Amino acid sequence: MKPLHTQNSRDCARAWYGGKEPPNVDVLDLLEVTDSDSQLLYSLSAAGESGDYTERMQSLRHTLQTPALFSSWDTERSQLQFFKTLLDYAPHMSMRFQVLLCLGSFKGSWRDNPQVFKQQIENFFAPLANAYDALTVERMAQQLSTLWAPHPDSLLDHLLHNPTLLCQILGDRLDPGEGRELKIIGHSFAEADPDALKKLILTQTVAYERRGEIHFNMAVRHTLEKWEEDPTIRQSVTQEIDLFDTLLLHELVEIALEETTDLSPLSAHIAATSFERCLKDSILAMAIDVFFLDWQPSALLEDQREIEGEIREESAQKTEVEAQVYDSIADLFAESEVSPAPAPDPTRKHIYNTEAKGNPDGKSVIVIDDSPMIRKIVSDVVVKMGHNIIEAADGAIGIPLVRSRKPDLIVLDLVMAKKGGMETLKELRSDPNFKTTPIIMLTTESNQRVIREAMTWRVNDYLVKPIGSKKLKERIAAQLDRR
């Protein structure tokens, strides 16, 4: 069996990317050469630290070395974040199997009895063959620990079972006394090569590590800072580390893995993303998803339609690939190759759009959510699907809109300060006109009690926040197709 991607580690880049694959090194070389506005923001060596980010990195090092900060991490939740990341970045059964082999080992002498082992693996992955929900993923993440374990004393092992030690290791990596080197370089990419920039946008890459240097797109900082102001962020696990620090830590984990292991880039990326999600769940991914909806360097403005077309084509190709059905357990053992933001309107968080926008000939969707970021994600997805959207910030506004507009679909937040989602759901379902109108519930809670209560009031589907635009699009399409 071939390992997943066997490129020489010193010739590759470990990237933060939103697509299934990062840009290749030739693209990054071209971007760096043609970027006229790069800055060395931080330098770490045995001689000490220097640069504009020195204070930030010192503060981050101190936070990582504070043991009490991570004492509340829950092993079960960390295991869930790892499993969800595995599903997101390894869409095929054979890829998931190989990543698990790279990052750990299956329990028992499975090589001595491959037929029994194959049946175990087939039974384990079977629920993922068709559509599955959050409860299925939670249950499987718990079952994984009975079948598989990370390599002892690995960074992933520490993440799942001793996060304080992992953070101490990362903190030591930033200590000048350890004699390690690190550079952080910021890029504007404003006038970089247009073809290379297209590939950066298509892969949603905002940062990458190579040769002990962390490179990042400086334009993303403004978006991340705005997201920190949103109440949704306050529900994240670790408030002491902000979204930009989380982005830097993702790449620091990639560096630590490259220095201490021979993991494939995909396996390392899954481990680093699991750490990131333990810190901030999927909030960083959501923020960057929104960033790429708005960010367009001047070199690309004329090519906007072409880029959008390429993004749609790439998305369609990924959907087609991910929809493949594996008919035999033998596929598990098949060889596989793994293969400056515009300033937002400062008043936006206080307003919402009660007028329909999008395609008036499309189907009608109403989103009721008190988070402006969530409303923006839902609105952008619906409009890009060719439908029209109306926004409301709470149930008190949303119910009259539903009654007057009679939408084809309602996307409803569970927790809102004024007339919450459960109250809104019950009131709508008590109205004979809306007993069968499809409703997708958005919730920050994945416990079965809340979900069961929503199901008794005939909610059609639910998504656990933070939500990604791809999954949201799939769920919305499934409900609208039934209308």
Image: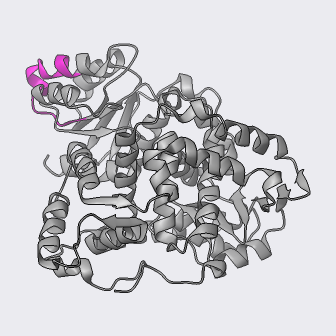
Q: Where are the magenta residues, as a range? A: 425-440
Tell which of 381 and 390 is nearer to you: 381
Q: Position of residue 103 (x, y in %)?
A: 42, 66
> Residue 42's image quarter?
bottom right
Q: Which image quarter: residue 402?
A: top left
Who's the residue at 62% across and 32% down the image? 240
Residue 267 point in image, percent of width and height: 46, 67
Q: Within the magenta stretch, is there residue 438?
A: yes
Q: Is residue 124 left or right of residue 388?
A: left
Residue 286: image location, x then y, percent: 48, 46
Residue that appears at 56% across and 54% down: 292
Placement of the N terminus among the 4 image quadrants:
bottom left
User: In the displayed structure, would residue 399 be above or below residue 81?
Assistant: above
* Vertical arrangement, residue 35 with respect to residue 148, above or below: below
Q: Is residue 373 above or below residue 212?
A: above
Give me the residue at 38% from left, 38% from top.
465
User: Residue at position x 18%, y 55% from top?
Assistant: 131
Q: Which percent across, then down, holds residue 259?
A: 64, 68
